[in-house]
Every structure is written in structure tokens, then in C-alpha cells.
């Protein structure tokens, strides 16, 4: 992925490659969310994923990637704090409501907030048709969340808590997307930022998961949990790595918006893997999400 992108940086091909990277990230991110919200406790699942993510990334960071500058080390420290808070709040939301309730709310807030943040930080500007696409995309995602809310059996107090946490998580998504874009652009070589990011991003949740498992009366077997951890780590490399490269190559707001087509793939994964119903209305809303993404990409 990185080998393909370096030769086209600054060229007309960069935007095209960023488009495909953002879509690849959308598919992988939906799969990652389904893995975390599957049959295992989401805290344990995330902890297992992070163990293998750090273990796989560490040799690359130490022996392959160029050494980071002191400025980049400081940025990576900030990324560690932001992503740790994001993962913690997301796991709390997943323990309170269904995947198909939490995920669309998080992803609906993300593009709107990221477009605004990228405009402030990077001076990015969207054309009117692109703004219409962002609003259509986010509106359809929120409608999808509202549809899922009507069908949930979670108690009202628990549901309000889950939605509040999902909203906060969505703001964290916008924060880390903009911040990571700054970091990967600061790095002389993108592999330096990516490798060390994956190393430090997996340091906290394994400890949380281990302590949580010790308190369980009937803890799950480690074998299946570790298999999910390996699958999640590999998926994370694609999901987060692809979107970070997309933000280095092209507009941050466009990459963030295109990535939110992950809600389409999330619904498919929820249907296929978690046995959650899709239906015609949800299919229509997912089509609107796709239409909004098209407007964002080609309306400039």
C-alpha cells in the first residue's frame, strides 16, 4: 500500500489512489467493528486485537521504518492519548446497545465534524455539491440509526447512555482523523508514523481486557479470542493504514466522508455475521449513503 502511494505523491494520480484507499478502509473498518462487537465481550475483543497489533507492528517500527523525529514523537504521544480515549468510549457504547445502533451514530457525526475540522486546520474547502453530499451521507446514516433505534429492545436509560457515548465517539473520530492526517503528513516517510502508531495504539487495552477477564465468573476460552485478535489486528492495519494514507495523498474531508460508506458494509456484516435484519428501508438508506459519497468525491 505504501509502496504504491509514494511514487504518486503530489501527482494527479494521488487523488484517485486516495479514493480507492478510503473505500478499502471503509470495508475493513466495518469488518473491524463487527469483529469487536461479535460474540466476545467488546473489551476483551479489543484487547486481544491490540495485543497482536502491537506485536506485529513492533518489528517493523524497530527494524524497517525510518526513525521518527522528535517532533513526530510528540505527535505520536498525542495520537496515543486521543485513540485511547476513543477506544474506551466506543467500548462503553458497545456494551450498552447493538452494533447497528451505535455504529451509524458514530459514523454519521464523523464526516460532518471532520470536514469542519479539516477546513480549520488544513484550509480545505468543499464545493456546494460536495457539501450536499456530506449532508446527504450523514443524514442517511442518522436515519439508519433512527430506524435501528425503533427496533431495539434496550431500556430507555441504557439507550440514552449508549447514544450519548456514540456521539462523543463520533467527535473523537473527527479529532483523530484530522490529527492523524497532520501526523502522517509531518512524517518524512509514512511508514514511520504508521508503524509506531500501531505499536503505541495497542498498549493500554490488553491490560484492561486482562483485568476484566480475571473478574469474570465464566471467562471465555483464550483460543477463539486470540483468533479474533489476529483477524482484528490484520484488519486494523488495512482499515486505519489505508485511511491515513488517503489523508496524506488528498483532502482529509473527502477521505473521511468516503470512509463512512463503511455503514453500508457494516449493515451487510451485521446481517451476514451477527444475524441482524437489513430490510428494504435500510437498503434504501444505504443507497443514499453511497449517493452522498459519490457527490463528495466527484462534486468538487
Image (spheres, helix red, strand yellow):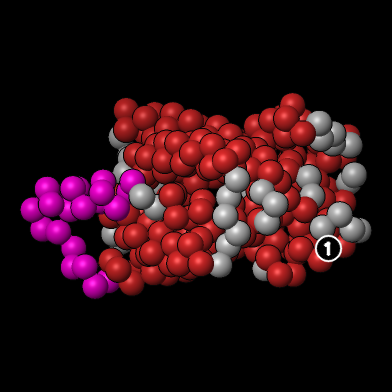
104 lies above or below 40? above
209 lies above or below 52? above
Between 205 and 257, the one nearer to me in the picture: 205
Which residue does the image show at 66% across and 49% down from the upper left? 187
State left or right for residue 128 relative to residue 95. right
Instruction: Judge whether residue 107 can be spotted in this image.
Output: yes
Where does residue 171 sit, x and y in percent of width and height?
A: 55, 32
Between 46 and 189, the one nearer to me in the picture: 189
Label 1: which residue? 8
Q: Name the dominant secondary structure of the magenta segment.
A: helix
Which quadrant is the C terminus positioned in? top right
Magenta stretch: residue 97 in it?
A: no
Magenta stretch: residue 211 in it?
A: yes
Which residue does the image show at 89% across and 37% down from the upper left? 127
Which quadrant is the N terminus positioned in? bottom right
Instruction: Judge whether residue 57 can be spotted in this image.
Output: no
Where does residue 40 sit, x and y in percent of width and height?
A: 29, 59
171 lies above or below 31? above
Where does residue 31 sit, x and y in percent of width and height?
A: 50, 62
Which residue does the image show at 30% across and 68% down from the upper left? 226
Q: How many marks?
A: 1
State left or right for residue 108 relative to residue 199. right
Between 8 and 186, the one nearer to me in the picture: 186
> Which residues make up the magenta segment?
204-224
Amino acid at each position: 500500500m505504501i509502496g504504491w502511494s509514494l511514487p504518486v505523491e503530489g501527482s494527479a494520480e494521488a487523488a484517485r489512489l486516495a479514493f480507492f484507499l478510503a473505500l478499502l478502509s471503509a470495508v475493513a473498518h466495518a469488518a473491524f467493528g463487527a469483529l469487536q462487537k461479535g460474540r466476545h465481550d467488546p473489551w476483551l475483543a479489543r484487547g486481544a486485537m491490540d495485543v497482536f497489533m502491537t506485536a506485529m507492528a513492533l518489528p517493523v517500527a524497530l527494524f524497517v521504518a525510518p526513525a521518527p523525529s522528535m517532533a513526530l514523537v510528540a505527535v505520536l504521544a498525542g495520537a496515543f492519548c486521543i485513540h485511547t480515549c476513543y477506544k474506551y468510549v466506543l467500548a462503553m457504547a458497545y456494551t450498552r446497545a447493538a452494533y447497528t445502533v451505535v455504529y451509524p451514530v458514530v459514523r454519521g457525526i464523523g464526516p460532518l465534524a471532520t470536514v469542519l475540522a479539516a477546513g480549520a486546520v488544513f484550509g480545505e474547502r468543499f464545493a456546494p455539491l460536495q457539501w450536499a453530499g456530506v449532508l446527504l451521507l450523514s443524514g442517511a446514516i442518522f436515519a439508519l440509526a433512527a430506524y435501528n433505534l425503533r427496533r431495539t429492545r434496550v431500556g430507555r436509560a441504557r439507550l440514552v447512555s449508549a447514544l450519548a457515548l456514540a456521539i462523543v465517539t463520533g467527535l473523537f473520530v473527527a479529532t483523530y482523523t484530522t490529527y492523524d492526517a497532520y501526523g502522517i503528513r509531518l512524517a518524512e516517510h509514512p511508514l514511520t508514523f504508521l508503524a509506531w502508531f500501531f505499536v503505541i495504539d495497542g498498549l493500554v487495552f490488553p491490560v484492561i481486557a486482562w483485568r476484566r477477564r480475571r473478574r469474570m465468573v465464566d471467562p471465555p476460552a483464550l483460543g477463539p479470542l486470540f483468533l479474533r485478535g489476529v483477524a482484528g489486528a490484520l484488519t486494523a492495519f488495512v482499515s486505519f493504514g489505508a485511511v491515513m494514507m488517503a489523508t496524506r495523498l488528498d483532502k482529509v474531508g473527502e477521505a473521511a466522508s468516503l470512509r463512512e460508506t463503511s455503514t453500508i458494509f457494516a449493515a451487510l456484516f451485521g446481517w451476514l455475521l451477527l444475524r441482524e435484519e437489513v430490510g428494504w428501508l435500510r437498503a434504501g438508506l444505504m443507497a443514499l449513503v453511497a449517493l452522498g459519497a459519490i457527490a463528495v468525491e466527484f462534486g468538487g
